[in-house]
């Protein structure tokens, strides 16, 4: 991950993006979805609005494994077998004393799984790009496989 606010490294990072725009994502320093820049959008931003780069951070794109997943449309009547990727976020909590650096709590408290089709870059659930999902950690999911292999 890198930012563009340091004049000593700015040009180096811009050159990295020019050489491989498909390997990075530019994320604005603000909340909300739909504002990330990918692929050719990165090159356009560099060429047309280079002075706006300070409001972005660049992250190396993570390329998760793809899997075939069953998605049920909102009406519940259609089952789609599509190629998807899963994004797993781990939540933690930490309580420390800033004066003594004493750590009282440092625990994993949960996770969130978002699943989206491989043809989209965005990942927001509220914006309709992805769905909330759960992990299947069972060793034997034959019954689920039978259910999901049938059309509803």
Image: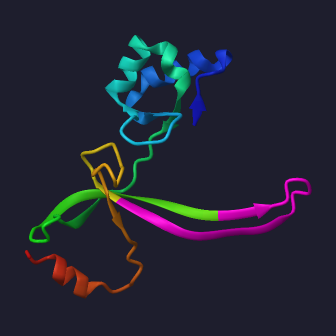
Residue range of the region highlighted in magenta in the rendering? 93-114
Instruction: Name the residue located 41 percent from the left edge and 63 percent from the top edge.
Output: 113
- Residue at image position (51%, 36%) is 30
- The image shows residue 75, relative to residue 8, as above or below, that is below
Quick one: quadrant of the C terminus?
bottom left
Image location of residue 128, percent across then percent down = 27, 52
Give yes or no for residue 96 being in the magenta stretch: yes
**Image: 123 above or below 55:** below
Foreground: 38 or 31? 31
x 92%, y 57%: residue: 100
Q: At which x and y percent is residue 115?
A: 33, 59
Nearer to us in this view, 133 or 136: 133
Whether residue 52 appears in magenta in the rendering, the answer is no
Q: Is residue 61 above or below residue 124?
A: above
Task: Pinpoint residue 59: horizontal percent, then vertical percent.
Answer: 51, 37
* SS assignment for the magenta stretch, majority: strand
Q: Quadrant of residue 24?
A: top left
* Quadrant location, the N terminus: top right
User: At which x and y percent is residue 94?
Assistant: 71, 63
Looking at the image, residue 100 sits to the left or right of residue 33; the answer is right
Q: Residue at x 34, y 25 (%)?
A: 41
Residue 84: name its quadrant: bottom left
Q: Quadrant of residue 133?
A: bottom left
Between 144 and 109, the one lying in front of the other is 109
């Amino acid at each position: 991950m890198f930012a563009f606010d340091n004049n000593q490294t700015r040009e180096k990072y811009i050159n990295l993006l020019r050489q491989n725009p498909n390997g990075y994502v530019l994320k604005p320093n603000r909340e909300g979805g739909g504002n990330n820049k990918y692929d050719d959008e990165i090159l356009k931003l560099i060429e047309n609005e280079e002075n706006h780069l300070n409001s972005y951070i660049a992250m190396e794109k993570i390329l998760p494994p793809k899997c075939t997943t069953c998605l049920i449309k909102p009406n519940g009547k259609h089952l789609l077998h599509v190629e998807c990727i899963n994004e797993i976020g781990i939540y933690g909590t930490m309580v420390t004393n800033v004066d003594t650096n004493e750590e009282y709590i440092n625990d994993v408290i949960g996770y969130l799984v978002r699943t989206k089709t491989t043809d989209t870059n965005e990942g927001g659930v509220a914006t309709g790009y992805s769905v909330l999902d759960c992990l299947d950690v069972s060793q034997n999911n034959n019954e689920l496989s039978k259910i999901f292999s049938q059309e509803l």
